[in-house]
Image (spheres, grey):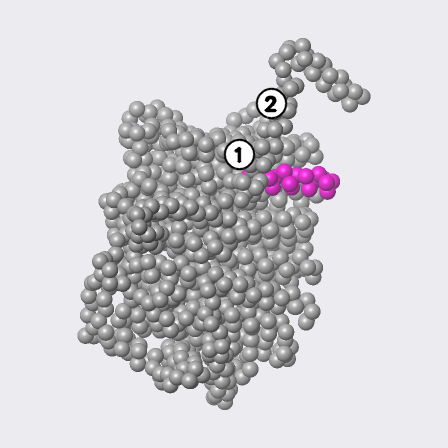
Amino acid sequence: MDALSSGFLLKIALLAYAAGIVGSLSALGREKAANCIGFGSAILGGLCGIGAAVLGLASGTAGTAAFEVWPSAVPYVKFSVKLDALGAFFVLIVSLLSVAVSIYSLGYARGFYGRKQVGVLGALYNVLLLAITLVFSSADAFCFLVAWEIMALAAYCLVSFEHEKSETRNAGVLFFIMSHIGTGCLVLGFLLLFQATGDFGFEGFRALGGGMSPARRDAAFLLFLFGFGMKAGIVPLHVWLPEAHPVAPSNASALLSGVLIKTGIYGLTRVLLDFLGAPPNWWGVTVLTIGTVSAVLGVLYALMEHDLKRLLAYHSIENIGIILMGLGASLMFLHTHHPVLAALALIAGLYHTINHAIFKALLFLGAGAVLQATHTRNMEELGGLIKRMPKTALCFLVGAVAISALPPLNGFVSEWLTYQSLLQGFGTTSSLVRLLFPLSGAMLALTGALAAACFVKAFGITFLAQPRSEPAAQAQEATPAMLAGMGLLVIACLFLGLFPATFVKLFDPITRQLMGQELSSQLGLAHGLALGNTRLHGGTISTLGMALMGICLLPVPLVLWLWFGRQAGTRIGPTWDCGLRGLTPAMEYTATGFSKPIRMIFKALFRPRREVQREYDYSPYFAKTLRFQSHIEEAFVTRLYRPFNRAVLRSSGRMRALQAGSIQAYLIYIFVTLLVLLLLAL
Amino acid sequence: MTAVLALFLQALLLLALAPVVTGCIRSWKARLQNRRGPPVWQPYLDLAKFLRKDMVISEHTSWVFWFAPYVVFLSALLAGLMVPMLTAQAPLSLFGGVLAVVGLLALGRFFLALGGLDPGSAFGGMGSSREMTIAAIAEPAMMLAIFTVAIGAGSTDLSQMVQASQGPAWKLFNPTHAMAFVALFIVLLAETGRIPVDNPATHLELTMVHEAMLLEYSGRYLALMEWGASVKQLVLMTLLANVFLPLGIATDASPAALGLSVLAYLGKLLVLAAEVVLVETTNAKLRLFRVPDLLSAAFVLATLALLSTFLFR
C-alpha cells in the first residue's frame, strides 16, 4: 500500500491529537513544555489532516481511507472510520483551522502562565480536535454519536475553562443542557434509521434512500433538523451560542465558532442529501426559511452587541443562516429534479462553510489578541488600537471585509454563488413557492448590508480614533506566534477570494457523490480567472480581475495629484472640535450610539428601554453626573424560553406529589408499569 | 486592442461626465428655486481647486484615513466599467455583473464610513452610522428590483440584461419594469444622498450624512471623495437608464450606431437628472426615522414588480 495514503495520514492525525492529550497532561506542572507539546502536536495533527483530506478528495468519491479505530466484538457496536468526499472536505476545514489556531495558541497560551493550567487547556483542545475529526470521518452512527458526545463534553470544559466567573459557569451549563437535548434528538433519529436497516452503518443508511414510509422520513427529518440545528445554532435554538462562545479562551472560541457549529451543517448535509432520499418540497422550504430568518436575526442581534466576542458569536448565527440558504435551495432543486442547480446551491453553501470557518476564526483570534492586550471585551472601552497593534488591526480588517461579503475577498464569492443559485431557482417551478427565492435573496442583501454596518462599527470603534480607556492606550502588539496564526488565515481568505475557480475543483467529488454532477469545468472560465456558469448563462465574476484592475486604475488619482497638486503640502492638525477646548475620547461616537438608528428602526423586535438619571444643582441642562442605561429585550429568551422553563418547572412541581419518598409507593409504580407493559405486549 | 480602447474610453467618459451631471443637477435645482446658481461646470473647478490645496489631516487618524479615498474612488470607477454605457457590451463585463457592481459600491461605502470614524469626531461617527443604516435598508429594495430584471433576462450579467431587453420581446410599457424602475429610483435618491433622504447642500448641521463623513477631509483626498461620489451617482443613473430603457444603445461599434448611442445616452441622463431635480425641489428632507418608510415603499414596489411577473409574461 502506498505510504502516503489518505487513511494512513488520517491515522497519524488522530494519533497526533491523542499524543497531544497525553503529552500536555503529563507535562501538567511545566507550563512551557505543556504549551509546546499540546499545541505542537495539534499543528502536526492539522497538517496530516490536511494531507488526508486533500488526498481523500483527490482520489474521488469511493472513500479510500477506511479502518476501524478498534475492533469490537459486540454486535452493532463498531468504531469504523471512512473518509468519503463530503467528510474529507470537512476534515480539511478542521485541519486548516487546527494548524492556524494552534500556531496562534503557542503565543496566546502564555497569557495563562501562572494563572491557569496550560496543560489542561492543551489536553482539552486536542480532545476537541480529535473528536471533531472523528465526527467528520466516522462511518457508522455509533462511532458518530460517541465522537459527538466527546466533542460536546470537551467543548463544555473549554467553555467553562475560566470557571471563576459566574457568567462562565452559567454559559457552560446552558450549553451543556441544550447540547444534550440536541443529542437526544439525534439518537432518536438514528434509531429510526436503524429500525429501517437493522444496522448502524452509514453504508446501510445510504442504500435506504426513500425506502422508509413518508411519515417516518418526515419524523427523521424533523429530529435531525432539531438535533443538528441545535449544534449549528439556528434561530430559535441559538440562545446558548452567544453565551458560550465568548467566555471560552479565544483560541477555543475560534474553534467553536469556526468548526464546532459546522458539525451541525455536516450532519444536516450528510443526512438530508446522503441518507434520506429524494426530499419532499417542504423540507427544502423549511431549511431555506430557517436559514433566511437565522441570517437576518443573527446580524440584527449582532449589531446590538458591544461585547466584541459576543458580536462575533451572533455573526456565527447569521453565517449559519447563509449556509443553510444554500442547503435549503439545494434540497428544493433536488425535489424539482434539477441536479445541476442542486449541485450549484450545495457548492454555494459549502463554500460559505469553509469561508466562514476561516474568517470567523481570524476575527476571534484578532479579538483574542485585543482581549489579551487590554483585558476587556467591551468595545466602549477600546479605540485607537490601530496605532498600538497595527498588524492585529490589519488582520482584523481583512476578516471584517471578508465577512461583510465585499469584493474581492472570499465572503463575496460564496454569497455571489448563493445569489446565483437563488436567482436560477425562480425558473425551476411555476408554483408560488418560487417567490421564496428572490425574497430570500433580498433578505441576503439586507443581511450583507447589515453585516457591513456591524463591522464598520466593530472595527471602527475598536481600532480607530482615540483610545477610550487607559488599558487601550497602553496596549501592546500581539506576539509573533499569534500574528503568524492570524497571517495564515489572512492568506487563506485571499486565496479563497481571488482564486475561486481553482478552489471549486475540490467540490467535484462531493457533488459527484451526492448529485452525480461535476461543475468545476463549467464554473471556471477564462483559464480559471473568472467564475461563472456557462450552461446556465447566469453571469460571471472575476475577483482577481477586479483586484488587478483596481491596481491598474491606481495611477489615475496619482497622475491627477502630480499634475495639479505638486505644490500642495500636508499639515497635521487637531480634529475639528467646533471651537471648543479640544476633543476628548468621551466625545467620540460609541458603539451603542452607532447602532442606535438600527435599534430604532427595528424597535418592534428589540423593544429598547433606556434609563437616564441626572443629578444637578440648578438646571437639568448643567448636570453634575449622568447615568445612562440601555437594554434591549432578547425576544427569544423572554418570549419563548422563559415561559417554557416556567411550564417545565410547574409541571415538575406537580409531579413531586408522586415522589413522596416511600418505598412501597415506588414498588407499586413499578408493578403497575410492568402490568401495563405486559398488557400492551399481549 | 479594441477591448483596451473601449475600457480606456469608458473610464475617461465616466470621469469626465460625472462632475457635469452633478453640476447640472445643482444648477437646474437653483433655477427651479429662482436662484441663479453655479454654472454646470462648477464641479470641475471645485475639483481642480481641491487638488491644488494643502491638506490638513487630523492627528488622531491612521492609514485607514488616507486609504479610504482611494478605495471610494477606485471602486466607483471599477463598478462603472462593468455597466454598459454606450455599447451593450460593457468593457469589464467578464469581471462581474450587477452583483459585483453592488458589491463594489458597498466596498467603497465601507471604507467611506471607516474614514468618517477615524478622526474621532462625533460628526463623522454620526455620519457613518446613518450612512450604513440607510444603505442597509435600501439594499433589499435595490436587490429585489434588480432581481426582477435579472430573472427576466436569466442573468446577472449587465450586458446580457441589456441585450435581453433589446429584442422584440421588449416593450416600452411594461408594468413590471415600471415598478422596479420606481423602486430603484428611490434607492438612487437614498444612495446618492439626495433630498428626501440626505441634503447634499448642508454643511456643519446635525442632519448631514454624507457631508459628515467628509468633514475632516481636505485637499486632494476631498477631491477623490467628491469625484468618487459623483462617479457613483453616474453609475447608478446609467444602470437605471440602460437597463430599463435600453433604447438607442449601440450593439455594434459602427460610427452611426455609436453616434446615436451617445445622443440617446445623454438624453436619458438629462431626463433622469431632471427627475432628481424635480424630486429635490418639491420635497422636504425627511426625518431620519421616516426614511425607512420611504425605503420600505420601494421594497414593496419591488415585491409587487416581482409578483407582477406572474401576470405580464
Dot 1 falls on a residue whose secondary structure is helix
Going by the picture, which residue comes out furthest to the right?
Answer: A682
Give me the residue at 22% from left, 58% from top.
Answer: A581
Q: Quadrant of residue A373?
A: top left
Residues shaded magenta: A211-230
Vertical order, A510 against B77 (above or below): above
Which residue occupies the foreground of this view, A288 or A147? A288
Q: Is residue A143 above or below residue B32?
A: above
Which one is closest to the eye, mark 2 or mark 1?
1
Q: Amino acid at mark 2?
A: Val
- Give SS at disc 2: loop
At 26% from the left and 61% from the top, the residue drawn is: A577
Q: Residue at x 27, y 69 (%)?
A: B218
Point out residue A574 in the picture as x, y percentages from the top left corner. 22, 61
Quadrant of the snapshot with the C terminus of chain B:
bottom right
Considering only order in the chain, which callout, 1 or 2, is on the residue closer to the N terminus?
2
Report the side of A290 relative to A362 (left or right): right
Q: Which residue is mark 1?
A: A179
Residue A120, position in %: x, y?
37, 28
Q: Main secondary structure of the magenta part?
A: helix
Q: Which kind of residue does numbered mark 1 sit on? A: Ser
| Chain bearing mark 2 | A
Please state, as top left, top right, bottom left or bottom right, where the N terminus of chain B lies in the image: bottom left
For label 1, count other residues whose C-alpha is less than 10 Å away and answer few (under 14), some (14-19) or many (20+): many
Q: Which residue is mark 2?
A: A74
